[in-house]
Image (cartoon, rainbow, N blue to C red):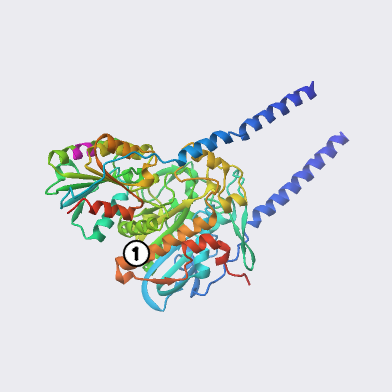
Amino acid sequence: MRKLSLLIIIIAAASLFTIGCGGDESVSKTSQQESAVSVQVSVKALEGPIAETPIILTSAGQSADVKMIESLLKKGGMEYEINEVLDSSGLGEARTLVIAIGGSSKGLGAAGIDAEDEIDRIDALLKEAAAKGLTIIGMHIGGEGRRGELSDKFIKASVEFVDYLIVVEGGDKDGMLSGIAAENDIFMSRVGSIVDSYGALKKAFP
Amino acid sequence: MKRKHISAIIILIGALIVTFYSGRMFLSMYQEEPIVTGPGVSSVVKLSTYFPGLEGSYGDTDVYIMKGREPGGSTLVLGGTHPNEPAAYIASVVLIENVVVKKGTLYVIPRSNRSAFTHNDPQEGAPQRFYIETPFGERWFRFGSRATNPVHQWPDPDVYIHAASGQQLSGSETRNLNRGYPGRADGTFTEQVCYAIRNMINTEGIDLSIDLHEASPEYPVINAIVAHERAMPIAADVAITMQSNEVNIGLEPSPVNLRGLTHRELGDSTETFAVLMESANASQGRLRGRTDEALVLSGVDPMYEKAADLGRLFVPYDENGHPLEVRVARHLFGIESFIISMSSYDGNKAMIVSEIPSYQNMVSRGVGAYLLPVE
């Protein structure tokens, strides 16, 4: 009886081990191959200037990407103001709204707001900017790292309102951003790196 | 009855042998690995110089000072805040053994939480040491714990209340150096180490403080810089520089309501530009498979490859893993970029530092090529 119990325990343990360590190799390799393929959606390229200064720069999602865009604007000598938590009453004399798209839980914490409040702010701001005739330029420069549940909320809340979208290509591997741009007839530039994004931004100005 | 006595004696002897050997293994973690003083080191002082209360304790650790001939800005690099994050420690050792400062002063504390090097985390199955091949033979380094050794600070409270803010965290965080800032002279052992580091920054007027870390691949803030708001313009510049050189790194602001961390407290309580850098370390993650020296060195882990396929990670993960030399190279590239960026941001804080191994050289030649022979 003892030997039988021992045998059953050994078989059960071996089965568990096999399940635990066993190979979905074919599954994981397949999904690995799938994830390596980037989705390409054709989008409308920007052919000439559509924006004018002064620029007001804000964030959609409170990531520090807005600071990197500020650094590029400063180095490029462009005239701008920055307000990461700009509300719809603060557009002032700006003629172009540049919005840095991408969520950061640390950034939201730093600003003392939650994701839902941030979405409400962006929604009101973008609607007001459109009503006032401002050119709206969206920049997603964080690549793959600035995608995921939190960032995607801000992408969905903002991209359809922009006139021109600049994306560092790692952030659009699944074609989500270019899909929204194509659907909404938005000009879009895919660039290789954040430094290239400044060239794409500059193209929008005379 | 006699048989029972014999069994009891055998079990007792067995227990004593296990206790003896495990005790020896535990105590062996107190032996410090050699760090070779490089050509650029002008002096080595103890942290207790800045807070005598630490003198003679396991909180008292070496501060390596590399002073240039020309006065200029100053930078502090903290390695070993969490000794289970080896790239942070090794990057600081590479600085000590290689770097020459021509203008300004570089301070490096490789074992910021020295006590945490004297044990590793129970039930994690982590190796005690890892070995790096060099042209002169093998060098060894300890893989320690995230927290101060309980031998040096005990017991943990049920709830850790951060003294400066009243923030509540789980009790074990009371031994986490990166939750204890700005520290207190009359606080816990860990808080006293924090206090000494803060005093050092204030006493020396250190312009830039870089706290090196690693994070598990499933943690959202990874391959990233976290910067205090005053340091943000410099950090943005560094992130752009690194990304332009195809080193993918994110930038995150230091939350004002997350207290006790270097990037918040050192930025608030001193004049330093406070930043923290993270690289990807599978050997401290929760999803890892076999935890051994190979994992520490190569970062190759089939479990993390699967997690990446399932979209559960915040860094790309494939069969190449995240090798130690790449993680160290990222930190060194970040440090060099910060020094250059600070120098152009404020000419009064300019530094000229040479012999930091380049990213490409560190990745292609490996860490061992930049470690000196132990005499």
Is B164 located above or below residue B61 in the figure?
A: above
Quadrant of the rendering where the C terminus of chain A is positioned:
bottom left
Residue B283 visible, this angle:
yes
Question: Label 1 neighbourhood size at 10 Å, few (<14), some (14-19), many (20+)?
Answer: many
Give the prevailing secondary structure in the magenta stretch: helix
Residue found 55% across the figure and 63% down from its top: B365
Chain holding disc 1: B
SS under mark 1? helix
Is B3 located above or below residue B375 in the figure?
A: above
Amino acid identity at mark 1 = Ser
Residue B150 location (% of width, % of height): 56, 50
Q: Which residues are magenta?
A: A121-126
According to the picture, the residue beneath numbered tag 1 turns out to be: B341
Residue found 71% across the figure and 27% down from its top: A11
Depth check, front residue: B133 or B26: B133
The residue most toward the right is B2
Residue B267 location (% of width, % of height): 34, 57
